[in-house]
Image (cartoon, helix red, strand yellow):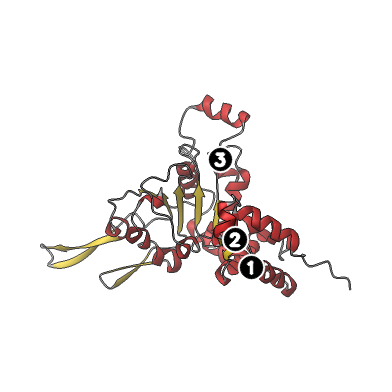
Amino acid sequence: MDNVGLALLGKEHTVRLALTAMVAEGHLLLEDAPGTGKTSLAKALAATVQGTHHRIQFTPDLLPSDVTGVTIYDQGTRRFEFHPGPVFASVVLADEINRASPKTQAALLEVMEEGNITVDGVTHPVGRPFMVIATQNPIEQAGTYRLPEAQLDRFLIKTSLGYPDRASAIEILAGAKDRTIGLTARITTEAVGTMADLAQTVHIDPVVLDYVARITEATRDDAQTALGASVRGGLALVRCAKVWAASQGREFVLPDDIKQLAQPVLAHRFVLDAEAEFAGVTAGEVLARLLDQVAPPVLRTA
């Protein structure tokens, strides 16, 4: 986290969330204005884990094969050869993902869920770790395609970088260069896989699992939601909480871990009721209210 922080000043919490998504083997959705450091985050993550990084600029004319790759006939060998697309990398930045057609967006669904790409009936693994960092601009919506709920549900975490504080901004301006240049790897890609396996051994008590279940049920039963968080949302919250606990040196998950991660993991997974949306209510506000209403488990005494 310190190494990535050399490239993104003053964004410790967002960097921790991004690394949590990577070790939990999930994907990150950033909703931010241009120029806030999204590309720098992807490059710094890849450099830190000794991985590869590709950026895909999603545009309305982008085709699925531009993402996944194509099979081309080689006249010399008289055989079809697969030419991998930019999705074959440790960290893939899908910039302005909502500007591409739904068909092109759907090209990412298989690889985000299973870590494989199927082209012409042949399945190609993308390797481990694999992480998609997708971005969308919250301001300009002209010419965009709204991400469907099924696709939003594939993103483990949704957050934003935002603009840096004054002190960080001055330091960035003083350097006036790409701060990802010169970053050295701290671990290998193989070590990320080992960390992911280790994080899944973190203990989570049944009462904490019951807390997660009650939170997700509350999002489905609330009068201001038309569609609540799915079981996949609850599983995502558990996966993230295990990584979060392990990163702090604990072998067990606390209710506070669940409460701290609920917003970035669950808020983008449910749809507001039309009346609530018209009234200007946000998913984050609804979830904050539900977290206050759903009582966390109390400390048990022997």
> Is residue 44 toward the left or the right of residue 101 in the image?
right
Q: How many marks?
A: 3
Mark 1 or 3 closer to N-term?
Answer: 3
Whether residue 279 is visible to the viewer of this picture, yes or no, is yes
Q: Position of residue 137 (x, y in %)?
A: 45, 44
**Marks 1 and 2: CB-CB under 8 Å?**
yes
Whether residue 204 is visible to the viewer of this picture, yes or no, is no
Nearer-the-camera pick, 25 or 182: 25
Label 1 to label 2: alpha-carbon separation: 8 Å
At 42% from the left edge and 50% from the top edge, which residue is drawn? 93
Mark 3 crowd level (few <14, some 14–19, many ≥20, 10 Å Cα): some
Which amino acid does the dot numbered 1 rest on?
Answer: Thr
Q: Which residue is mark 3?
A: 162
At 27% from the left edge and 59% from the top edge, which residue is drawn? 65
Q: Which residue is mark 2?
A: 266
Q: Position of residue 119 (x, y in %)?
A: 28, 67
Q: Which residue is mark 1?
A: 216
**Marks 1 and 3: CB-CB under 8 Å?**
no
Nearer-the-camera pick, 140 or 72: 140
Q: Secondary structure at mark 1?
A: helix
Mark 2 or 3 closer to N-term?
Answer: 3
